[in-house]
Image (spheres, grey):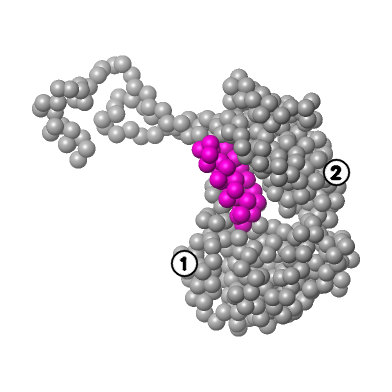
Amino acid sequence: MLAELTINDIIRKQRTYFHSSHTKEIAFRIEQLNTLKRAIQENTASIVDALHKDLHKPELETYATEISIVREVDYALRHIRSWVRPQKVKLSLEQLPGSGYIRPEPLGVVLIIGPWNYPFQLLIAPLIGAIAAGNCCILKPSEIAPNTSKVVSQIIQKYFDPAYIAVIEGGIDVSKQLLAEKFDHIFFTGGTAVGKVVMAAAAKHLTPVTLELGGKSPCIIDTDINIEHTVNRVAWGKFINAGQTCIAPDYLLVNSKVKSQVLKSLQEVIRSFYGENPEQSSDYARIINQKQFTRLSKLLQDGEIVTGGQINQSTRYLAPTILDNVSLEAPVMQEEIFGPILPIIEYNDLSEAIAIINEKPKPLALYLFSRDRKIQQRVLQETSSGGVCINDTVMQVAVSSLPFGGVGDSGVGKYHGKASFDTFSHQKSVLKKPFLFDLKWRYAPYAGKLDLIKRLIG
């Protein structure tokens, strides 16, 4: 039935459903969150299979980075009653007697456009916030991950009324049709270039947007570290999903005093993770398509290959690769890598590392490995990024109580936990006055009242 409807028909039906006020009921929102959780749990095998077909994603990685979104549902269920509760505010003297409060209300019909790298989790995560806030929603999965797109569509159609939540599959033409429509909010996860297109389309309707983009997330490695823990955490964050992670460490800024030790340890850790031939490892993913594979293969020329560099075009395999002697002007340092290639940049003084970071657009994430609290504070003070993780990588995204989002070129707006609820809510201000009595100081004629006004505002 859904396939027979036009995009405009679906949006119109959702607006009708939203105006029934059904989605605003707290009991309804809780019921739908529980339904979403059940849908994920009952279809886990299909989700795992789809992600393996699209990205050759290992089952453990799928559970850890995709199925784990169930925890966000649980977090919303625990806190939703407090989130929807109106928040009282203090009033100034001239507003008395009266009361003021902020009342969260749903925006209406929202559009969520998902990416291909984590095609399940990054589509469902914002949906949790949209449901909790009381909206109707249209989901647009990435056509670049077709198997996951199909599974998501099947799941949503099975468990939800399309007048409430609908999935629209398709390529660029479908995305253009959707962006031509009027929504109450658009949530997009993807690259900066497409993010600009989304924002421009939204501007025609004055539609607010949340853009979760990316960028070159730097990773500084100081001398005062635990080498084993540092290298394990860097290698894991870089090479999960074959590096196709928006917050993966994009390049390392390594203090010259520990560089040789870090390089040696990285090679050892890659072998311990994936064996002598990672191509044979069941724990290593593949590049999503030939376009990305070709782009990444060219970047292998931008430095000295310390380890890795092997490719297999027929299977889209690109080995975990470390590049040394990389020029800051090389293409690999000019764009987000989004693959399993890790350039090493040496620095002698922290000021050099900070300068390199600040010369580039603000990244989605910044990583620092150091026990030195002065260095930690200096990096926090002198750099700007969507978020910071100290002495680990990627794990910051798993904390529901920490808002996640970018700044500048790396994104607009935040989500996760309460931030997701806020993103899909309008914070409506309400001032309430009684009829007990009516102060005349603000009414004309104004003669003799100026001194009182001066005292009130003074």
Which quadrant, please, contains the N terminus?
top right
Extreme left residue here? 448
Q: Residue at x 31, y 16 (%)?
A: 435
For the question of whether residue 207 can be seen, the reply is: yes
Circle nearer the N terminus (2, 1): 2
Disc 2 to disc 1: CB gap under 8 Å: no
Give the secondary structure at mark 1.
Answer: helix
Between 102 and 287, the one nearer to me in the picture = 287
State the separation of the CA atoms marked 2 and 1: 46 Å
> Label 1 is placed on what type of residue?
Glu
**In the rendered image, which residue does mark 1 sit on?**
382
**In the rendered image, which residue does mark 2 sit on?**
45
Between 420 and 370, the one nearer to me in the picture = 420
Determine crowd level at label 2: few under 14, some 14-19, many 20+ residues with C-alpha closer than 10 A.
few
Between 206 and 185, the one nearer to me in the picture = 206
Q: Position of residue 384 (x, y in %)?
A: 50, 61
Give the secondary structure at mark 2.
Answer: helix
Q: With 56 as the anchor, is 322 left or right in this view?
A: left
Above-or-below relation of 360 to 116: below
Q: Which residues are magenta?
A: 185-214
Q: Residue at x 64, y 63 (%)?
A: 336
